[in-house]
Image (cartoon, helix red, strand yellow):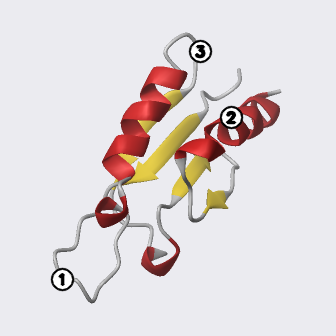
Amino acid sequence: MKAKMTISVCTNQRYSAQTPSCGARGSLKLLEQLKIATQKSNIIVESSCCFGHCAKGIVVKISPNGNFYHHVTESDIPKLLNDANKLND
């Protein structure tokens, strides 16, 4: 039985202007866009706490056995979904 693919989006928010965070870069909006894009699929989209890659945010991880994606934007959603589907084959 195949494990369900999960796309996790870091939504950690730091409130210091000197400290980068995914939340400060708009990860909540990206999370919602991914949820809309996957409504008719069996991919799970969830919020996640910090992955420790703050300087490279927005950070997304595809699980199981997936990769981290850095500096993710809305234009990356088709690639994320394509990669998630490939990993699920």
15, 52: nearer the viewer: 15
Label 3, residues with CA under 10 Å away: few <14, some 14-19, many ≥20 = few
Name the secondary structure under disc 3: loop
Residue type beneath disc 2: Pro
Q: Is residue 27 left or right of residue 68?
A: left
Name above or below for residue 50 compared with residue 60.
below
Name the residue located 72 percent from the left edge and 41 percent from the top edge.
79
Image mark for residue 16: 1
Q: Position of residue 41 (x, y in %)?
A: 59, 15
Image mark for residue 78: 2
Q: Position of residue 76 (x, y in %)?
A: 64, 46
Looking at the image, which residue sits at the far front?
75
Q: Are marks 2 and 3 in contact (CB under 8 Å)?
A: no
45, 3: nearer the viewer: 45
Name the residue located 53 percent from the left edge and 40 percent from the top edge.
7
Label 1, residues with CA under 10 Å away: few <14, some 14-19, many ≥20 = few
Question: What is the C-alpha distance between the residues marked 3 and 1?
Answer: 37 Å
Where does label 3 land, which residue? Answer: 41
Q: Position of residue 5 (x, y in %)?
A: 61, 32
28, 61: nearer the viewer: 28
